[in-house]
Each structure stands twice: as C-alpha cells, then as structure tokens.
Image: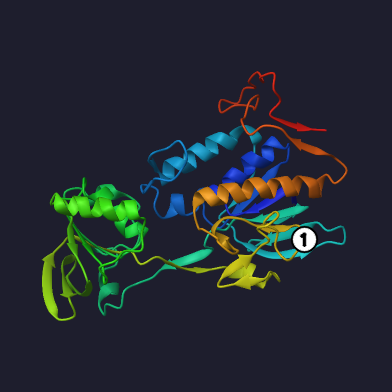
Amino acid sequence: MIKTDILIIGAGPTGLFTVFEAGLLKLKCHLIDALPQPGGQCSEIYPKKPIYDIPAYPEILAGDLTDKLLEQIKSFEPGFTLGERADTIDKLDDGTFIVTTNKGTKHHAPVVAIAGGLGSFEPRKPPISNIINFEDRGVEYIIRDPEIYRNKKVVIAGGGDSALDWSIFLADVASEVTLVHRRNEFRGALDSVEKVQELKNQGKINLITPAEVKEIQGENHITGVNIIKDGDKKITLETDHFIPLFGLSPKLGPIAKWGLEIEKNAIKVNNALDYQTNIPGIYAIGDVNTYPGKLKLILCGFHEATLMCQSAYQRIHPDKKYVMKYTTVGGVEGFDGTKKEAPKAVVKKIE
C-alpha cells in the first residue's frame, strides 16, 4: 500500500505543478499515470511542439517544459506509479480513499486530485478511404520529432492551434509547407493566424482554403495528395508527409465510473471555491474538468492546482490555521537539492 497526502492521477504539466504547490505546504504527493514517463501529452504526443503561453517563456518546447517542471519538484521527492492506469476508487469510513490500478497497485490518501488531461485519447482521422494504408508511411497524426520533416515537402490539414502552430514551426524546417483547411476562417489564436498569413505572403507557407484532402497517392510511401478546393476544383500536390491535425477524441476511461458528475466527457467541479467534485475529497484540475467559462490551457491548470492545494491542506489539517502572506517564493529547497537561505519575509506561514 502506497500512502501519501495527495494522490494525483495524471502526471502531465498540471499534475506535476501540483506537487510543487503541495510541497510548499509540506504535503507529500504521489502520481499515477498510464504512460511510462511523466509529462502527459507534452512528452508522449508533441515533445517538440513549441508552447507560447507559459509565463516567462516566450517560447518553450513541450518536452522542455516537462523537464523544467520535474526539476522544480525534485526537492519535494514525489512518488510515481507509471505505466499503470487508475482503475477503481474506494472511499473508507474515515473519508480517505484507496485507488487501485489495473495492475493491482493500491494507493491510500485523504485527497485525490484528478489531473488526467483529456484522459485516454485517439486522433480524429479524416474520412479518406485509403489513409490507413499510409499510416507510418508518410501519414502522421502526431508530430513527435519535427526533424523527420527536415527538407521534406509537408501537407498539414486542420484549422486549430495545432495545425497553425506546426505550420509556423515547420516553415523553417521543411522544404515546403502547405496548410489545407476546409474553411477560410481558423479556430486558433489570432496571433497564430496572423503569423501564417505573414508566412504565406513571404512565400514560406502555401495556404489552400476552403479545401479538403480527399485522396492519398503512393504505393509503399505517400507521394502526393489530391485536394478539392471550392467544392469542385481538383489540386494534386507532391508531398513526402501528410499530417491531419483534427484534434483528439478523449475518453475518461474507468474514472467515468467513479460516481463523479460528468458533463460532455469532463468532470464538473466547483470553480467558485476549490475545484472539488461532487464527492468531497476528490478534486479535478486541468483539462479533465469543466465549469462555466473553462479554458483548456496549461496556464489555467496551474492556477487550479494552486487553489486546490489550499483546500487540500485544510482538509488534511482541519485543526491548523493556514496564513498566506506572499506569492513570491524564497527559502524553498532548490533545484540543486540544497536548502537556500530564506529572506527575512516569510513566504508562506503555517501556524
């Protein structure tokens, strides 16, 4: 039996940052993740994708963000159960929980924080009859290493942030980048749309809208795609890679059977207070939760984790008074594992 103060289900960015906020409150954390390494989607799906909305980082690769978060929490010595899926949860008479994985590993904690991102997921595939024949033969739904596209011709399909961001990134990697979208309007960030337009004007990106990729050409490897533009105009492009980026189809998996209130494949929480679910002691933070005005951003997950930890402390230590004084951090055991001298002003005080 693994015992901890806060059991975190999901070792993505939000789950990892929870360890830091809990550590400042002297709470120990243990994380469960079905993936074999920490980082969630940032490590498994797009480690080389640039992220632009992390404070103090104008741009940081998703994999590097994971590394920084792991460095940040190292001194708090979290535990990890990796390569195992949280399967069942049982609430004991004292209000604590036992979570058992699909491999039978049991975890005991007074607080459970579900930070499972989108849950388990599969890429949404376009309705192209022979696309399955070219998977891993020039058709990729996820970009893990952009270097494989160095000096190659690439066709990207999609109208969201991923399609826009990767088109921008690969413009300096691939020999030719074509972005195909079925509408003239894009769903991504306005800044990204403007960058794509600028790169188009510079001749660094080919933009074809409104259009859809309808056929894939090739034998052992993709050699080209057929595109229908404006409903009837056929365009044939030579390409080495076709990357349809239509998002992921998420599934909560076993968590959906835990008695939690679910809305549109996400867990409803009380965002007015502490991101607690309908079951006291179980919280949901990050992309896995939903509430009015919810934004699925890593930045928002960090905020939710911070408030959740305050509530968790009060739940674990109801007889102690917690006083929040400052938001700047000082005197925390540092990234090199040594204890740094604290400034005169106490950052966070527990009485």
Asked if residue 280 shows in the view, the reply is: yes
Q: Answer left or right for 210 relative to 141.
A: left
In the displayed structure, does residue 340 sit left or right of residue 164?
Answer: right
| Image spot of residue 342 (x, y percent) | 67, 20
Whether residue 37 is visible? no
- Coloring applied to the structure: rainbow
The quadrant of the picture occupied by the C terminus is top right
Q: Residues within 10 Å of mark 1 (few under 14, many from 20)?
A: few
Which structural element holds mark 1? loop
Q: Position of residue 2 (x, y in %)?
A: 73, 49
Which amino acid, mark 1? Pro
The residue singled out by tag 1 in the image is: 280
Residue 141 sits above or below residue 190 on the image: below
User: How many discs appear?
Assistant: 1
Which residue is rendered at x = 64% and y = 45% of the image? 306
Asked where in the image residue 319 lies, by quadrant, the reply is top right
Image position, residue 46 (x, y; %): 39, 52
Residue at left offset 79%, top offset 63%: 91
Q: Residue at x 24, y 54 (%)?
A: 196
In the image, is residue 200 above or below residue 19?
Answer: below
Residue at 54% across / 39% down in the picture?
70
Nearer to us in this view, 10 or 233: 233
State the residue in front, 152 or 265: 265
Q: Is residue 10 left or right of residue 46?
A: right
Q: Quadrant of residue 213?
A: bottom left
